[in-house]
Amino acid sequence: MIPYDLIRKKQQGRAHTPEEIRFLVDAFTGGNLPDYQLAAWLMAVYFQGMTIDERHGLVEAMIGSGQRLDFSHLDGYVADKHSTGGVGDKVSLVLGPLVAACGVYVPMLSGRGLGHTGGTLDKLDAIPGFRTGLGLDTFQRLVAEVGICIMGQTDDICPADKQMYALRDVTATVGSIPLICGSIMSKKIAEGIRGLVLDVKWGSGAFMASLDEARTLARALRETGEAFNVDTMIRITDMNQPLGRAAGIWCEVQEAVEVLEGGGPDDLAALSKTLSVDILRLAGIDHPDQAVEEALSSGRAREKFDEMVAAQGGDVKALTDAVMHRPAVTIPLKAPRSGCLQAVDTYACGLSLITAGAGRRRQDDGLDPSGGFILEVKIGDEVQAGEEIGRCFGADRGKVEAAAGELAATLSWGEEKVEPPRLVVE
Amino acid sequence: MIPYDLIRKKQQGRAHTPEEIRFLVDAFTGGNLPDYQLAAWLMAVYFQGMTIDERHGLVEAMIGSGQRLDFSHLDGYVADKHSTGGVGDKVSLVLGPLVAACGVYVPMLSGRGLGHTGGTLDKLDAIPGFRTGLGLDTFQRLVAEVGICIMGQTDDICPADKQMYALRDVTATVGSIPLICGSIMSKKIAEGIRGLVLDVKWGSGAFMASLDEARTLARALRETGEAFNVDTMIRITDMNQPLGRAAGIWCEVQEAVEVLEGGGPDDLAALSKTLSVDILRLAGIDHPDQAVEEALSSGRAREKFDEMVAAQGGDVKALTDAVMHRPAVTIPLKAPRSGCLQAVDTYACGLSLITAGAGRRRQDDGLDPSGGFILEVKIGDEVQAGEEIGRCFGADRGKVEAAAGELAATLSWGEEKVEPPRLVVE
């Protein structure tokens, strides 16, 4: 096969064979296809798309570039959740221990935050001693022993995706649905799971700005999951405002723990439960709603979280230590006028976290674990001028002040009463 | 300016400023823009196109990457011709000396053959001693002294185009009209010419397969020429069959000399005269038709060719030496049936030259100067079964036999009488 001919084929809108896609992925991963040729091909894919069969060929090739885990020896259902990302989304920290407490095994390979989105690993890294860089052997052992392990991608799982993503990131080809689908599904399927719940976010803080785009991605993800015999459940959920009240690093860990203790913000608790019930339903567990409620009210979900933290070397006492990552600077956020919150520029909320020091512009940026914000208002809420509606915090006064200004500017106020957006759309 | 943002801008179909295009070209040429980012941008240009202003920015930036010649000190009009390429097109070899004999200065920077198309330099290189790799000083001196010099691109003229073309060539982005326009016009304008005749080929052996595409390219070329104050004349001409009878290396030199001596195939002679008259008209020469006829019939055009050959170190006697590059093997081509020639796959004719050894698959392939074919029939001609309609020749029997088979397969025969295609469409 000649790379030029394959670029030309995709450029003309013709479909590749699985062999052609495997050839491209393998040649690139093996250093036998120059990155300028893959870059041209990726841009052609951006414009011409991919058929179902091509997407499956891509997923197959990416899985084949590394190791595929096997948990078939375990005595229970093995499942995971993936979210397409947003601001304040700490559902993984709740859902993982919660479904593990209900008997589902959760091998969760997570990512770090970049740009406006946060990442589960950054939050776990803020727990003193917690190790997110384990070997695959340890990962598999902890999944079997504890029921859950959350760690970072390793070079053994889908190395092709890592290399391709690095190229997509600098060639403006990240936002292509078949490539997004390939990237998500190859990594999840390689985890050796039987069930997968996908939380596709739509809205001002999501990669899919419109509901239509979110539905197109959801369809692609579902088709791919089914083709690889993974029980796949898709939810399309709201990211037109931050999820929960807290966004940042340590404040998100604290909020996740609140939900595990039966409290926390309504939206975060509701979404965490919905997605957990979905997983239990895939697992064939009877009365999944009751099981979830019982795991929370009994304290077993909260205990499972501690168990996971301890198993991964983390200091469990830190979770209840009031001075842990206490921000040096806190600036209150006040309502600039009386009225109703009409809309939130959630993407800009995420960027304000970078300003505060709690987000990354580039992959090698450092993070301030004490940084973040609390936003007490939701779309549709009515406030009085001057009322405190939240706060920004972190280690550096200048950064926090700038972030507070940016955050305030993300909120649109008006006279008119607006309906709150639906949290779980479908 | 951030390269990522510029890729994204073009991907979304928004127009660049001239500064943005200059930034991309300069950064790439200076080694400050990785080729994978330019490759992604080129593919985005392929899909989204460019506005007039963007095209002019591209031409300006490419010219600015090198030297721009100046012939304003000369006492006459300075002009050149460019063809988009095809099979059997040896018009430059005729037109250059012909218009130079009429007093027009011709600084002609030419190219080599690649794929199905031939190149003027390869033909001149077949003249023993002829040097096509002169310095720009010698080039300018010979243009002034002889009236014409034909040589290869140098690194001093539009180096950005050379680098970008090398990348386009391996990323399937050669066939983009704004990029074709930028590549052609930057090099021609940098020659320091006042007038330019462009021969845009359309048909089965041209880069523009349809008349519509050819017209689109022609429009882009004309607009750019006008924007840079170059008198620009465009012809759209037929490439649905080889031009003239001969295609290859030395056989094309011989056929060009035949036309300069007042003979040669009708189509080649007619097109050479039409384009020469166009240049003389741009130059403001009175009665350009008569001037062309007179330069041919008087022998002055033929003498100018010898003068050019001698000035560039070539052996003039070789042109009349009957054994020069005489092919070791000649295989006659016979009509497989009685009937009318309906169509020619001219692209495949060009590829058969590669098989014969007289064309290049890759830039570093060697050439057999004795290789080529003569095709005596034109679309619309009627033949009897078994009648000799041409011949294939070259140094290697196996190659020539294979080429003859390929060439025969390019010809479509039928009962029906068809009209010959119009040579000069507009």
Image (cartoon, coloured by chain):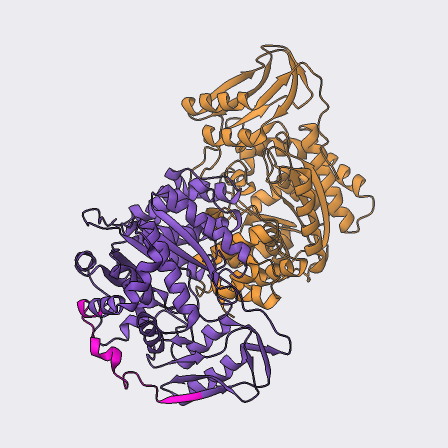
Chain colours: A purple, B orange
Count of numbered tags: 0
**In the rendered view of the protein, which quadrant contains the C terminus of chain B?**
top right
Q: Is residue A254 left or right of residue B206?
A: left
Residue A419's quadrant in the figure? bottom right
Of residue B184 and residue A27, the one placed in the foreground of this image is A27
Q: Is residue A19 magenta?
A: no
Of residue A113 and residue A215, the one placed in the foreground of this image is A215
Q: Is residue A329 left or right of residue A425?
A: left
Residue displayed at 50% across by 31% down:
B351
Picture layout, residue B130 above or below residue B158: above
Q: Is residue B278 left or right of residue A350?
A: right
Q: Is residue A176 left or right of residue B380?
A: left
Image: magenta residue range: A309-331
Q: Is residue A328 magenta?
A: yes
Instruction: Estimate the x, y position of residue A369 in percent, counting from the top left.
Output: 32, 79
Q: Furthest residue to the right?
A: B287
Instruction: Estimate the x, y position of residue B134 in percent, counting from the top left.
Output: 51, 52
Q: Could you tell me if residue B242 is visible in this image?
A: yes
Picture layout, residue B208 above or below residue B266: below
Instruction: Estimate the x, y position of residue A423 in percent, counting from the top left.
Output: 48, 64
Of residue B227 and residue A123, the one placed in the foreground of this image is A123
Instruction: Estimate the x, y position of residue B193 in percent, counting from the top left.
Output: 67, 56
Residue displayed at 45% across by 23% down:
B402
Picture layout, residue B400 above or below residue A56: above
Q: Could you tell me if residue B101 is visible in this image?
A: no
Residue B118's quadrant in the figure? top right
